[in-house]
């Protein structure tokens, strides 16, 4: 096949995976909790439904994002129906009417459990509001997104850096709570703010959102870039030095294309050029060390010892495919296109759950064969961390980038 045929094959696969594999599961009536609203707390690998865990702001924000963008890309009414169902629950149960923003978690009945806040979690509330507005022009969603943006920005300790933990009334607190705990003493760079603010800027064009995107972009080409190890540093100390030796290859992939999206939204030619250089360095390093001999991205490695994690997690596989098509779009280097095709083949062969839909959470493929294993987010098909966020976004971006490349 020539390059055009290869690109069109990737686009066709992304459309099919989203509409025939992922969303039939995630829009199904089976996973909805009609007694309490929202979705069951857990759906196991064997499709057993449970309500034994609290419901997460991160999960619901991600699901609104996925459904809203699925409707925007594919135009199917069932996607808008799922977006509305999930957004209504998000606002009804998670929104904090007294102090703004959203609670980190609620129980099965929708009562607040953890009323503390974090920039990481609130980013998904902003993202949900902006994505929902972009899908259906709901002015209430846009207002809530902008209001929460302003509250988040008031917690800045410096450009692109924020409190690790926040009280319900948006003050700093020393003790972190919730599902995501960041290393002590670090400056948190919440990379999902890039995605949230880019969605919000698309909706509003607000100059204050562009200013915050500029801060995020400058962080990524400054202290957020570890030039010595050719990677992004999610955690740095107050002096801008990296914290820890574990490097997430999934996050290197994810941050690379988010960073470029941010730079292009800012529209500063100097920042765009520097970001292109930075992302090219990072993605070349991923190509060099990131894939095993079955062409699957390693989840992480130790930058001092080189030791790599053995199991493979669904979200990092999606980010690898997305980053590789981005790398090809950015550089024209067909090694990235090759890597994207091989990662997609791996996903289709090993991760797609043909019995119940969507993808498995964690697998290992090695000399002993293929097997489902425990790992990040466990075995479940749905839980506080397992949702259609990363893999649906991969599909949306592959479709978009193929169209852009062919248009050029």
Image (cartoon, rainbow, N blue to C red):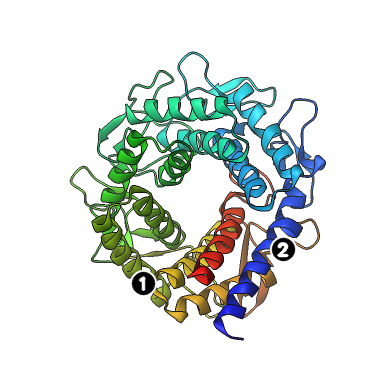
Rendered view: 399 above or below 243: below
Mark 2: few/some/many CA within 10 Å (<14, 14-19, 20+):
few
Give the number of the disc on residue 285: 1
Residue 44 visible in image: no
Q: Residue 386 placed where, x, y %?
A: 62, 48
For the N terminus, which image quadrant?
bottom right
**In the image, farthest residue toward the left:** 239
* Towards the viewer: 133 or 91: 133
Q: How many marks?
A: 2
* Residue found at x 51% / y 60%: 319
Where residue 25 sits in the image (x, y, percent)? 76, 50
Horizontal and vertical percent for residue 99? 45, 16
- Comes first in the chain, label 2 or label 1: 2
At a point 31% along the width and 50% down the height, the residue shown is: 217
Q: Rounded to the nearest whole Å, what is the CA distance between mark 2 and mark 1?
A: 30 Å
Task: Identify the element where label 2 is drawn.
Answer: helix
10 vs 156, nearest the viewer: 10
Q: Dots 2 and 1: beta carbons under 8 Å?
A: no
Horizontal placement of 255 versus 407: left or right?
A: left
Asked whether, in this view, residue 280 is left or right of residue 270, the answer is: right
State the residue at coordinates (38%, 49%): 265
Specify the label residue 16 is tagged with.
Answer: 2
Badge number at residue 323: none
Residue 76 placement, left or right of 7: right
Q: To which quarter of the image does residue 52 belong?
A: top right
Q: Secondary structure at mark 1?
A: helix
- Residue in view at x 42 percent, y 79 percent: 333
Residue 238 is drawn in which quadrant? top left
Q: Residue furthest bottom?
A: 1
Taking the image as shown, residue 309 lies to the left or right of residue 294, namely left
């Amino acid at each position: 096949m020539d390059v055009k045929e290869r690109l069109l094959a990737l686009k066709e696969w992304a459309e099919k995976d989203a509409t025939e594999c992922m969303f039939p599961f995630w829009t199904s009536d089976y996973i909805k909790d009609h007694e309490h609203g929202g979705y069951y707390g857990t759906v196991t690998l064997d499709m057993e439904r449970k309500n034994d865990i609290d419901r997460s702001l991160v999960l619901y924000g991600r699901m609104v994002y996925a459904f809203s963008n699925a409707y925007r890309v594919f135009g199917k009414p069932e996607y808008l129906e799922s977006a509305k169902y999930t957004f209504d629950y998000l606002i009804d149960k998670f929104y904090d009417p007294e102090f703004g923003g959203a609670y980190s978690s609620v129980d099965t009945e929708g009562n607040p459990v953890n009323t503390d806040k974090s920039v990481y979690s609130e980013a998904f509330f902003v993202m949900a509001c902006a994505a929902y507005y972009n899908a259906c022009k709901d002015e209430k969603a846009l207002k809530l997104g902008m209001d929460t943006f302003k509250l988040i920005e008031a917690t800045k300790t410096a450009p692109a850096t924020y409190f690790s933990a926040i009280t319900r009334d948006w003050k700093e607190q020393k003790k972190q709570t919730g599902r995501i705990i960041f290393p002590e003493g670090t400056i948190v760079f919440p990379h999902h703010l890039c995605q949230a603010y880019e969605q919000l800027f698309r909706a509003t064009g607000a100059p204050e959102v562009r200013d915050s995107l500029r801060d995020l972009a400058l962080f990524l080409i400054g202290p957020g870039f570890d030039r010595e190890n050719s990677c992004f540093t999610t955690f740095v100390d107050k002096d801008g030095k990296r914290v820890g030796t574990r490097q997430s290859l999934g996050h290197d992939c994810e941050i690379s294309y988010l960073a470029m999206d941010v730079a292009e939204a800012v529209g500063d030619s100097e920042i765009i050029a520097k970001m292109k250089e930075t992302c090219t360095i990072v993605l070349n390093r991923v190509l060099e060390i990131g894939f095993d001999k079955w062409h699957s991205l390693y989840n992480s490695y130790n930058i001092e010892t080189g030791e790599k994690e053995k199991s493979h997690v669904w979200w990092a596989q999606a980010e690898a495919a997305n980053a590789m098509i981005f790398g090809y779009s950015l550089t024209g280097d067909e090694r990235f296109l090759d890597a994207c095709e091989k990662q997609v083949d791996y996903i289709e062969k090993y991760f797609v759950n043909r019995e119940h839909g969507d993808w498995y959470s964690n697998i290992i493929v090695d000399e002993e064969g293929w097997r489902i294993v425990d790992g990040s987010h466990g075995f479940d098909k749905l839980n506080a961390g397992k949702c259609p966020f990363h893999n649906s976004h991969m599909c949306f971006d592959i479709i978009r980038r193929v169209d852009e490349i062919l248009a050029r």
